[in-house]
Image (cartoon, rainbow, N blue to C red):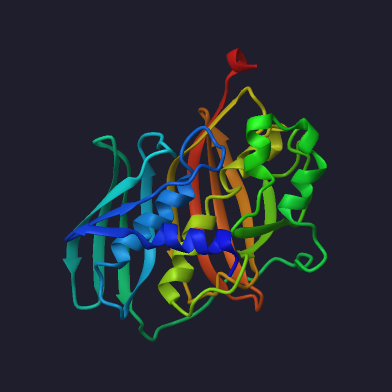
Amino acid sequence: MSHVLDDLVDLLSLEPIEENLFRGRSQDLGFRQLYGGQVLGQSLSAASQTVEDNRHVHSLHGYFLRPGDASLPVVYQVDRVRDGGSFSTRRVTAVQKGQTIFTCSASFQYDEEGFEHQGQMPQVVGPENLPSELELFEKIADQMPEHLREKLLCAKPIEVRPVTEKDPYNPVAGDPIKYAWFRADGLLADSPALHKYILAYASDFGLLTTSLLPHGKSVWHKDMQIASLDHALWFHNDLRADDWLLYAMDSPWAGNARGFCRGSIYNRAGQLVASSAQEGLIRHRKDWA
């Protein structure tokens, strides 16, 4: 395991403070606010630590209420809403400076036999010969602001290989569809819960920006105000976050300064392991140009 991946695993482990109360440290990825995937992964970790091991998370629905501060830890309060015969429900509140920055509900279930079907995995080129996101960033390093360059060009715990290369500074308007392969940069422990925390963490990368593709805009443009408003995840099968996963993303709608995006996550065998949905702010701020 690389040191940056080891650091991410530690980030998602959390420190128990009291019954149903946990503290997680934060990381600065160079964004204007705390990276939403960190809060998603840590919230899921907090909720999971209050549920029986044989009940596995199948869905998480959250709202980002305030920008987080990457220089401060986050405290997670878990409310044990219900433990039924088959399902357990948890509500998690993430707090910084005495204010709620994120809240979510997560549902857990025993494994159970039932009907099965799924949509087909898109036919795209495999990850083996694709350049990594880091390699693509290195090509445009001279265009990056100095404060951002250090954050984007360092080693990453999650390796991302975009299927279609885009120039973030000069994007060409196109269909609101995007594909990317991703995996943890190293071997993870055989803990199904940990692999889901990692997936939750990674699920926020690139999803909302799919809604910018038809408009020839990028999160790197200074006149764009981008922020996640909500995020939902459904876990369909066990998964390995340290093996390649395909993230198929599309945006069927945008309006009123908001973009709505969906994601389907497949393993190399074509099995649909998770789905995501997100709505976010995509405000064009001409006064920021």
List x then y, in percent, for residue 50: 24, 67
Q: Which residue lies at the image location 51% right of the left edge and 28% below the top edge? A: 256
Outermost residue, front side:
3
Vertical comparison of 32 with 116: above or below = above
Can residue 230 be seen at all in this image of the molecule?
yes
Outermost residue, top side:
287
Residue closest to the eye, 187 or 48 = 187
Residue 185 falls in image quadrant = bottom right
Quadrant containing the N terminus is: bottom right
Outermost residue, bottom side:
113
Quadrant containing the C terminus is: top right
Can residue 235 be seen at all in this image of the molecule?
no
Q: How many marks?
A: 0
Q: Which residue lies at the image location 80% right of the left edge and 61% below the top edge? A: 130
Q: Which residue lies at the image location 29% right of the left edge and 67% below the top edge? A: 49
Vertical comparison of 52 with 49: above or below = below
List x then y, in percent, for residue 74: 33, 46
Residue 72 falls in image quadrant = top left
Residue closest to the eye, 98 or 87 = 98
Whether residue 129 sits left or right of residue 81 in the image: it is right
List x then y, in percent, for residue 26: 42, 46
Whether residue 153 sits left or right of residue 278 in the image: it is right
Residue closest to the eye, 264 or 71 = 71
Residue closest to the eye, 109 or 289 = 289
Vertical comparison of 97 with 87: above or below = above
Q: Which residue lies at the image location 76% right of the left edge and 64% below the top edge? A: 124
List x then y, in percent, for residue 117: 52, 77
